[in-house]
Amino acid sequence: MRISFHGAAHTVTGSQHLIEVNGSRLLLDCGLYQGRRADTYERNLNFKHDPRKVNAVILSHAHIDHAGNLPNLMKQGFEGPIFATHATVELASLMIADSGHIQESDAEYVNKKRAQRGEEPIEPLYTKEDAEQVAGMFSGVNYGEAFEPIPGVIARFYEAGHILGSAGISLDIEENGKKTRLWFSGDIGRFKLPLLRDPVLPDHADYMIMESTYGDKRHSDPAIAFTEFRDVVKRTIERGGKVIVPAFAVGRTQELVYHLNEMMSEREIPNVPVFVDSPLAVNATAVFRNHPECYDEETRQFVLEARHPALDFKMLTYVKSVDESKALNERTDPMVIISASGMAETGRIVHHIRNNIENPKNTICIVSWQAPNTMGRRLADREPQVNIFGEIYKRKCDVATIGGLSGHAGQDLLMKYALNVKDSVKQIFLVHGEEKQAMTLTELLKEQKMHEVHYPELHESVEL
């Protein structure tokens, strides 16, 4: 058996790991690498293996850095099945189609610049139509259900607790009479996250491919973060303002909606209108509604007691049209607006910020990590003025930053995850993490007598 690490090696994006066994090839994830525009296009376009020779794909979850390059794999000759949990099938189909639209828009933008320089146009990495073809290749599987993606390999999905439908994957492999269990963590979630069940820990693995995103950092309890969010909403409403929240359309938006539902049901905050203004978030929430089997026991209990769904309540409106979105900026009454994108770089959130940033009654609430040079980062840094659509706006509103809402396991849970297979594992491969984070985690594992920990290079192959 050979494993080749073709993505998420020495970085946190572009998850892609090729397993060669019994003369067949199985790909774990096929994500988009995300980085500088020029590097991103070339790296995502050119696979370091032949897509025509891949027999099957198993997808850990729907995030674009794990699923977003499937259309390009198909365009270059992959014809096999793509296995995923039922919730991931729905969510990934939606997100990849949205990504196809973005690829087309990005290519159009780049080609305008290239035309000005007299350069040849580029093709989009893939189109929305390509993405829709990939949706027909998905095969949905229940958690815990055994399936055979390639000969001699029995796979099962286990709850990862990261986003709806996310899974860790066990592969029971028989090759030349030898039996081996390989475990792929995907992205590991956290205990006590809203809506979702807690991650299932690995069991009796011989080898493990494991994420290391926060290998150097412990997270605070998510309950603390949501108490902070409640206080921000309460004080803004009391002074008659709007709460504007840039939030990722899948995962974070639904978590916030669920907690606002709880807060109003418990009368912790006044009943004010809540608007979710992001087409992708609206569609993704419909997928969440379709899969209550993924909810944790606390959410199920809340739904029973409140007698209404977790992601729908009286004061909540899912905004569909552009006109509805624009109308929100004409209103002056207190409200909460949750909109994408999460780093406030594109989408309807930019318009909401522009229309509300100069009112001292309002609050812009930052609920996730913000990359450098994004508007979200400039707001989180409380810069006194912000350039929006080429115009300078003075920041007179309040800015609140809420930490501790990451959907990734912190250092303590990563350690617990690895130590659960201490007695059986022969080697752990750390992926989906920068060097500092992975090396910190490696040293901590060595202190626990787990010495066979490897941080593979991009495109490195290992024989097992």
Image (spheres, helix red, strand yellow):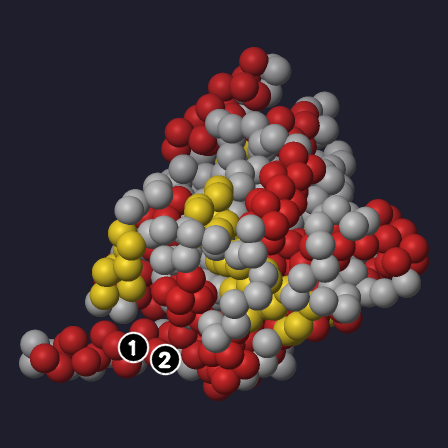
Assign a secondary structure to mark 1. helix
Quadrant hosting residue 102: bottom left
Q: Position of residue 142 (x, y in %)?
A: 80, 62
Do the residues bearing badges 2 and 1 touch, measured as CB atoms within 8 Å? Answer: yes
Q: Residue at x 82, y 65 (%)?
A: 309
Residue 122 in sight here:
yes
Distance of label 2 from label 1 (alpha carbons): 5 Å
Label 1, residues with CA under 10 Å away: few <14, some 14-19, many ≥20? some
In the rendered image of this protein, does residue 365 appear above or below residue 318? above
Residue type, label 1? Ala
In the rendered image of this protein, does residue 80 appear above or below residue 178? below
Q: Nearer the viewer, residue 252 or 83?
A: 252
> Badge 1 is on which residue?
107
> Relative to 203, is 361 on the left or the right?
left
Q: Nearer the viewer, residue 426 or 14?
A: 14
> Badge 2 is on which residue?
104
Assign a secondary structure to mark 2. helix
Q: Residue at x 92, y 55 (%)?
A: 305
Residue 208 in sight here:
no
Residue type, label 2? Glu
Label 2, residues with CA under 10 Å away: few <14, some 14-19, many ≥20? some
